[in-house]
């Protein structure tokens, strides 16, 4: 199957190789949570909710009493994928993604400012169309900012792949399952540091560099968008206060 | 679950006794209701219902399956509910299983009728494609995104709206003798059949706090309840199912009283829901 049209250079969903899907971010979608956000990348749609900082619920989980405990749970809705099948809760894929999100977010949260407390991040996938990992991290960033949790920088994530000898930005499900390499990058946008890097399949070294650069560019574009959403939200809050 | 001081508890109970609740509603008044349809593109039908701070999503997926041997002339419907940890931290991990199971069973009781499928809200024989060979399996999934009490009523409303949004693809069946009589089924991508959802009931939960009962309780009010009765009523005012929750016992005469109140309230809820569905459909068409 051709994932990039050799004549026009367009991808299966009509995008250019270095084009991202439509982004949409919304803050404050779960009214009972301390912070929450909805993030859409094309057809991938996730909700993140943040509870905390609050008292540690389970003392045994506390590892370091000088820093806040960050916890994360990733869950997929039953109807989020194309074919419906019941999966047991806490399957290995979810556990792995939960861990990845937790570690990525922990890198940006100023945990030493909130000792003896815990922060819970819950991400719920409503629709999955490739790049759920990235979308979850972006949603979690928005939700943490909404909850007013001190952070070093905005963490954003984006994936890039390599199919039909073309580097492609922000893979959808069809491209993701095509068997090519899939590089997911998470960066601290302003500090320009990589906090997440995952790749499956194999790539030549020099190609990897271009693909990773492309993903990093994607992350920066998302960071700009997230900043816009937060700024817009802050302006609205300011208006409400009068 | 909800941390309330003695003063707050007293305020909630006192307000209910005086027919003026903490958010300004009277005892039998609902919170603002908003409905959206078609929010999950992969599903055959879907809906999001918001009641105050409670938000639920329901999706309906149809798959071709085989009818059971016991009921070769009926399709199958299953209902599952999941409580997302985004709604409350206590739902993380396996914490939501108990509540999810309770809600799933209550909805099954109210919507699916008995084991034989008699009295079901959805006409199961309308789901049959070829008798004994092929039928539609409907998977109804509920997801609680945000929780502020009255989850059962919100889920039932969401399922009703999702079913009215559902289009089942039209199928062309050609019986092929060479293939051992296995029917060949051709699913149309363009033509859809709409369901008759007029028989799908809504659920009205009456929560008893002190001597009085209220509709559409928030989670603070639910934390003060002694017992609750969920009555499912269809549009003809018939009762389709009944569930009682909570520890305290109820006098039978109180239960009959609650049922008749639920019946009256349900008619008001129907008109509210129907106008919201019409508004949502109009918004979706634009």
Image (tube, rainbow, N blue to C red):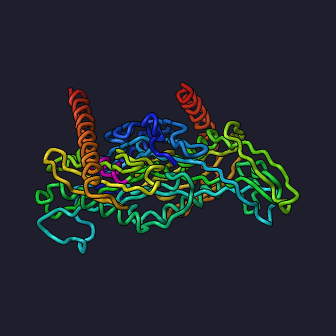
Is residue B114 positioned above or below B185 on the image? below
- Asked if residue B286 is positioned above or below residue A181 in the image, the reply reads above
Question: What secondary structure do most residues of the magenta stretch adopt?
Answer: helix
At which x and y percent is residue B247?
50, 65
Quarter of the image with the C terminus of chain A is top left
Position of B14 with respect to B56 (left or right) is left
Viewer-closest of A182 and B279 = A182
Residue A38 falls in image quadrant: top left
Asked which quadrant contains residue B245, the reply is: bottom right
**Residue B221 in view (yes/no):** no
Q: Nearer the viewer, residue A148 or B147?
A: A148
The answer to whether residue A230 is left or right of residue B128 is: left
In this view of the protein, can residue A2 be seen by the observer? Answer: yes
Residue A148: x %, y % from top left = 20, 46
Residue placed at 61% from the left, 44% from the top? B44
Residue B271, picture quadrant? top right
Q: Is residue A240 above or below residue A4?
A: above
Horizontal and vertical percent position of residue B22: 37, 42
Q: Is residue A134 magenta?
A: yes
Q: Which residue is rendered at x = 57% and y = 36% of the image?
A: B273
Magenta residues (range): A133-141
Q: Residue furthest right?
A: B177
Q: Residue at x 24, y 34 (%)?
A: A228
Q: Which residue of the protein is positioned furthest toward the bottom in this rendering?
A: A60
């Amino acid at each position: 199957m051709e994932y990039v049209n050799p004549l026009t250079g367009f991808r299966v969903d009509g995008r250019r190789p270095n084009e991202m899907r439509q982004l949409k971010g919304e803050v404050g979608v779960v009214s009972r949570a301390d912070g929450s956000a909805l993030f859409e990348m094309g057809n991938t749609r996730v909700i993140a909710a943040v509870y905390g900082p609050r008292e540690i619920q389970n003392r045994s989980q506390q590892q370091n009493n000088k820093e806040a405990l960050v916890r994360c749970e990733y869950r997929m809705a039953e109807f989020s994928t194309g074919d419906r099948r019941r999966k047991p809760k806490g399957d290995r894929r979810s556990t792995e993604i939960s861990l990845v999100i937790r570690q990525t977010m922990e890198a940006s949260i100023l945990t030493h400012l909130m000792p003896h407390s815990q922060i819970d991040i819950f991400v719920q996938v409503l629709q999955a169309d490739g790049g759920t990992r990235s979308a979850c991290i972006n949603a979690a960033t928005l939700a943490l900012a909404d909850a007013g949790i001190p952070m070093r920088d905005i963490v954003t994530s984006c994936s890039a792949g390599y199919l039909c000898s073309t580097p492609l930005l922000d893979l959808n499900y069809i491209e993701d399952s095509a068997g090519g390499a899939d590089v997911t990058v998470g960066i601290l946008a302003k500090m320009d540091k990589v906090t997440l890097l995952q790749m499956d399949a194999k790539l030549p070294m020099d190609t990897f560099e271009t693909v990773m650069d492309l993903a990093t560019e994607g992350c920066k574009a998302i960071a700009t968008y997230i900043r816009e959403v937060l700024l817009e939200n802050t302006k609205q809050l300011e208006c409400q206060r009068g | 679950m909800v941390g309330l001081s003695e003063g707050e508890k007293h305020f909630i109970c006192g307000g209910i006794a005086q027919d003026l609740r903490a958010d300004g509603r009277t005892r039998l008044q609902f919170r603002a209701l908003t409905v959206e349809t078609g929010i999950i593109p992969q599903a055959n039908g879907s809906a999001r219902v918001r009641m105050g701070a409670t938000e639920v999503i329901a999706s309906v997926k149809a798959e071709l399956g085989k009818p059971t041997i016991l009921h070769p002339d009926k399709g199958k419907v299953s209902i599952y509910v999941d409580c997302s940890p985004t709604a409350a931290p206590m739902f993380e991990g396996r914490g939501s299983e108990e509540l999810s199971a309770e809600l799933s069973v209550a909805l099954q009781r109210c919507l699916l009728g008995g084991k034989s499928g008699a009295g079901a809200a959805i006409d199961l024989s309308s789901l049959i494609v070829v008798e004994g060979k092929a039928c539609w399996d409907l998977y109804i999934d509920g997801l609680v995104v945000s929780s502020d009490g009255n989850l059962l009523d919100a889920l039932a409303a969401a399922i009703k709206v999702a079913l009215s949004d559902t289009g089942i693809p039209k199928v062309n069946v050609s019986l092929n003798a060479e293939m051992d009589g296995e029917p060949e089924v051709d699913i149309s991508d363009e033509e859809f059949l709409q369901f008759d959802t007029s028989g799908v009931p809504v659920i009205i939960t009456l929560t008893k706090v002190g001597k009085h009962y209220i509709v559409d309780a928030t989670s603070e009010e639910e934390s003060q309840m002694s017992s609750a009765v969920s009555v499912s009523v269809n549009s003809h005012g018939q009762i389709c199912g009944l569930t009682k929750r909570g520890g305290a016992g109820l006098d039978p005469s109180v239960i009959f009283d609650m049922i008749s109140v639920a019946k009256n309230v349900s008619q008001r809820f129907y008109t509210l829901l129907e106008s919201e569905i019409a508004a949502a459909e109009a918004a979706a068409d634009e």
